């Protein structure tokens, strides 16, 4: 046996064994990667649309972002009020949308 073939056998022996990953696990990993990718994109977009630099997007800033990024309508088409309301409510983790805070 040559030194080369001994190295290959050692590398095969030292290599971690392959494990089988279920389809559900693969789907979860893909979803996690997609979510991470979206988070990175959002963090890049926030400074562009956060005009008052408070670290949040207010209603007008969200409208501008949605208007600019929507490819399903003609350029410059603003989202419907119901769409904006829905997004603002979903993003309202502190319960302060439209002054609805408890404090």
Image (spheres, grey):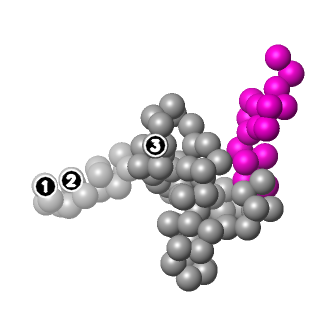
| Residue at the spot 57% in from the left edge and 71% down from the top edge | 70
Which residue in the structure is indicated by mark 3?
A: 51
| Residue at the spot 54% in from the left edge and 58% down from the top edge | 64
Tag 2 and tag 1, C-beta contact below 8 Å:
yes
Q: Is residue 13 left or right of residue 40?
A: left
Q: Nearer the viewer, residue 66 or 20?
A: 66
Which residue in the structure is indicated by mark 1?
A: 3
Image: 43 above or below 22: above
**SS state under label 1:** helix
Among the two numbered marks 3 and 2 on one chain, the one whose residue lies closer to the N terminus: 2
Q: Is residue 19 visible?
A: no
Q: Nearer the viewer, mark 3 or mark 2?
A: 3
Position of the C terminus by quadrant: top right
Instruction: Give the x, y percent position of residue 62.
Output: 60, 52
Spatial separation of the CA atoms under disc 3 and disc 2: 60 Å
Q: Is residue 85 visible?
A: yes
Q: Is residue 34 magenta?
A: no
Few, some or many residues within 10 Å of mark 2 (<14, 14–19, 20+): few
Which range is magenta?
86-103
Instruction: Give the x, y percent position of residue 48.
Output: 41, 49
Spatial separation of the CA atoms under disc 2 and disc 1: 6 Å
As drawn, the label of residue 41 is: none
Position of the N terminus by quadrant: bottom left
Q: Nearer the viewer, mark 1 or mark 3?
A: 3
Few, some or many residues within 10 Å of mark 3 (<14, 14–19, 20+): some
Spatial separation of the CA atoms under disc 1 and disc 3: 65 Å
Few, some or many residues within 10 Å of mark 1 (<14, 14–19, 20+): few
**SS state under label 2:** helix
Which residue in the structure is indicated by mark 2?
A: 7
Instruction: Give the x, y percent position of residue 87.
Output: 73, 53
Instruction: Give the x, y percent position of residue 54.
Output: 51, 31
């Amino acid at each position: 046996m040559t030194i080369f073939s001994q190295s290959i056998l050692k590398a095969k022996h030292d290599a971690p064994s392959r494990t089988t990953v279920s389809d559900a696990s693969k789907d979860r990993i893909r979803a996690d990667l997609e979510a991470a990718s979206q988070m990175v994109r959002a963090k890049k977009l926030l400074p562009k649309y956060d005009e008052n630099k408070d670290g949040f997007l207010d209603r007008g800033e969200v409208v501008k972002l949605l208007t600019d990024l929507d490819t399903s309508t003609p350029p410059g088409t603003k989202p419907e009020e119901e769409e904006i309301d829905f997004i603002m409510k979903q993003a309202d983790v502190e319960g302060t949308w439209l002054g609805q805070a408890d404090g």
